[in-house]
Amino acid sequence: MMSILTIALCITFITSTTFDLYQICDCSQLIFQYDCLSASLECNWDYDNNECYDKPCSEIYYQNACLKQLKRCYWAQSSCFNFTSCGQMLESKYNYDCQGQNYYCPQYYQYYCLSIKDVQVCPSITDPDICNYYQSLQGICIWNGQSCTLAQSCTQFFNNGSSNCPWEYCQHSWDPSYQQEFCSPNQYSDLKTQSQCAQGIQILGPYLQNIIGCYWNPIVNLCQERVPSQMNYANCYLYSRGTYYWNSKTKENGDCVPCSQFQELLIISIFITILI
Ligand SMILES: *[C@@H]1O[C@H](CO)[C@@H](O)[C@H](O)[C@H]1NC(C)=O
Ligand SMILES: *[C@@H]1O[C@H](CO)[C@@H](O)[C@H](O)[C@H]1NC(C)=O
């Protein structure tokens, strides 16, 4: 019992500091009208029934909005299409940016985007060319000279001859006083605009659970850390990458809660049951 509690507490801790893109809200979960209208690029509000529903993929015109519908849509050829599987995506033969098509298809490999079910773990990769920047579920892989390992820090990408700083997760900079390039972790202070701030900070891993939330503090005009449970009706959905929603139809009586908390607890309890 104690260990179950510990596990539950750990999970609560994890979800309260990083966003989980596996938990992006479905339109139907946005019961608070303001949330649905915030998601108006990918959801519609039904004024008769007071509920939020999916926009057809073909009517989603922006990549970011299309990607937020990862369970049902993907982005290719500047349009949003119905998603069936990673292998069926139109452009996958030519477009290396698989994550830019659907987050469930994170890695390009031999003319296809691999599904999250098919990506490898770093140590099983033996070819350095495939290893470097490979998106495993645990994080980004890097070749250390002998084998493929999970990258632990941004600075590692500037060692051992590999010198591409993975821009989604790290910051590439030039220090004039040292006459040297650096690859360092992203920081809140680097996010200069409200829309950048709303995206949060991406760290190296684990994949899709690697976004640290922040919010725009209007008093000091800076991007700062904030856990979603502290957010209010106005910034809950917007500053959680669409993974939290306001669980009330009014702004007064609600909380900012993750969209798939129940599902996650269910999976954990199944997992615990298996362990026992
Ligand atoms: C896409 O999916 C929607 C909803 O399931 C369906 O109504 C529509 O016909 C599909 N469109 C195409 C082009 O398959
Ligand atoms: C760089 O490569 C050497 C061997 O070639 C290895 O011993 C070392 O651990 C590597 N460094 C990093 C940071 O991966």
Image: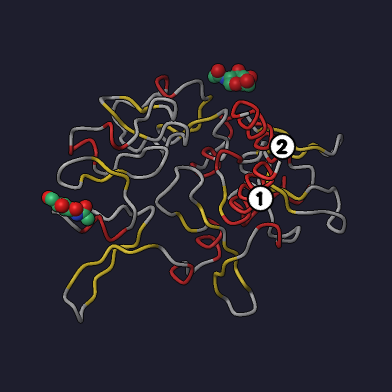
Q: Is mark 1 within 8 Å of ligand 2?
A: no
Question: Which residue occupies 32% across, 25% down?
Answer: 112
Residue placed most toward the observer, 266 or 50 = 266
Reading the image, the residue beneath label 1 is 9
For the C terminus, the image quarter is top right
Residue sitting at x 43%, y 54%: 203
Would residue 42 appear left or right of 87 to someone viewing this image? right
The vertical placement of 243 against 91, above or below, is below
Image-quadrant location for residue 207: top left
Residue 119 to residue 186: above or below: above
Residue 14: x %, y % from top left: 58, 51
Q: Circle 2 sits on which residue?
A: 262
- Helix, strand or loop at mark 2: helix
Q: Which mark is residue 243?
A: none
Q: Earlier in the sequence, mark 2 or mark 1?
A: 1
Q: Amino acid at mark 2?
A: Phe
Q: Is residue 86 above or below residue 198?
A: above
Q: Nearer the viewer, mark 2 or mark 1?
A: 1
Q: Pinpoint residue 222: horizontal percent, then vertical percent.
A: 55, 74
Within-10-Å neighbours for mark 1: few <14, some 14–19, many 20+: few
Which residue is rendered at x = 48% and y = 68% of the image? Answer: 188
